[in-house]
Amino acid sequence: MKTAITDRIKYIGVDDTDLDLFESQYIIPNGISYNSYLIEDEKIAIIDTVDSRKSDEWLPMVESALNGRTPDYIVVQHMEPDHAGSISHLAERYPSMQIVASARAIQMLPQFFHAADFSARTIAVKEGDTLSLGAHTLQFFMAPMVHWPEVMVTYEQSEKILFSADGFGKFGALSHDEEWACEARRYYFNICGKYGAQVQALLKKAATLDIAQICPLHGPVLSENLGYYIGLYDTWSSYRPETEGVFIAYASIHGGTAQVAHTFADMLRSKGVKVSIADLSRDDMAEAVEDAFKYDRLVVAAASYDGDVFPVMHDFLHHLKIKSYQKRKVGIIENGSWAPSAGRVMRAMLEQMKEVEIVEPMVTIRSRMNPSDLPALEALAEAMK
Ligand code: FEO
């Protein structure tokens, strides 16, 4: 990662490679970065801080980047602690520095920092407001619910840089070089997925700006081929599938449902359908959520359990519902050794989702797949292909 974004704008973020779970829920096998930027001009502005886990590493970097000067402003785009966690440390070290944020973010400050009184040093900005640093001018655009209500993004007019808060962020530390889309997609659907309409609204604002680089709060600075990234964000936030194919998510207790799911996957493949399959008990739930949104069709296969559905499937469908899963065709396979209940529960959960079409027939397996089950599976495969 180069630290110079331009001559006067520096990257001063940090990698976190030993956090067990991001937001206490997402595995991050390649870590994550908390990005922070410094703009040097007649006035100096820092754009966002970092998680307090990394304050001790970050503050000396800030000091070194300042080269003896004092920051005039900290721009707080987002109050979530992975970015706002070091505000009090920074504010304590530089008592003349002012805090620039949306009114909503300023309201939130005391909730996170009880012991500090920032009331005399905040500047509330609203849609379209500008802040001159000298040759550089920051312009602020509100981006509520991308990903919290207080979020704003910042456009630097002279160098055409969009500081995009969580937008265009990804899992993965910057020290780990990897393809952008996979971990950006998993990040997007799990973290911002519910807020497609709000992301669309932000993309419309961004379309009015001439953008040379996008500087998000996680993951790499995007400097080239911006249409590719913006195009993916447009697809994701409008809930359009990215790929034609079927994602099969199964929840199996003793292997019977797993066997059916894999047999069904082979049936689809033999019909030329692209298939991805996940074991919800063992594979990453966040990746399963991502794949459900990525593909245009989904098949859920689950065992019955306590008159309901096997819990990991309930958890998966609950995730889809709260992330606004919609506009997809879904097939159902249930398994039950005495009184199958999984299909009824899965259907009821899916019916609560917007524009989800349930593809018939629903297939019922009794304990272990039997040759007599094949025609029903074949009929569902035909309907899903
Ligand atoms: Fe990266 Fe919503 O915080």
Image (cartoon, rainbow, N blue to C red):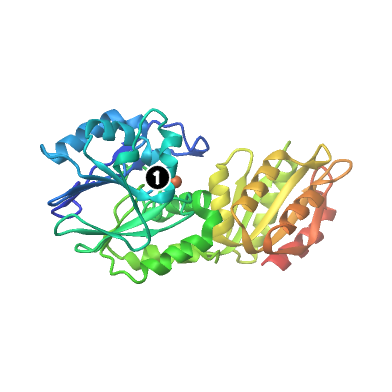
Which of 35/361 is in front?
A: 35
Residue 139 lies, with reference to residue 364, above or below; the image says: below
User: What residue is at 73 percent from the left and 45 percent from the top?
Assistant: 257
User: What residue is at 10 percent from the left and 37 percent from the top?
Assistant: 68
User: What residue is at 15 percent from the left and 52 percent from the top?
Assistant: 8
- Residue 383 visible: yes
| Residue at the extreme bottom | 208
| Residue at the extreme front | 120
Q: What element carries label 1?
A: helix
Which of 232/252 is in front?
A: 232
- Residue 171 visible: no
How far from the left and from the top, in percent, is residue 192? 50, 53
Along the horizontal axis of the image, is 24 left or right of 328? left
Q: Mark 1 points at which residue?
A: 106
Residue 84 lies, with reference to residue 332, above or below; the image says: above
How far from the left and from the top, in percent, is residue 374? 79, 57
How far from the left and from the top, in percent, is residue 111? 46, 36
Residue 119 lies, with reference to residue 149, above or below; the image says: above
How many other residues sit within 10 Å of disc 1, few (<14), some (14-19) or many (≥20)? many
| Residue at the extreme left | 68
Along the horizontal axis of the image, is 193 left or right of 232? right
> On the rendering, which quadrant does ligand 1 occupy?
top left
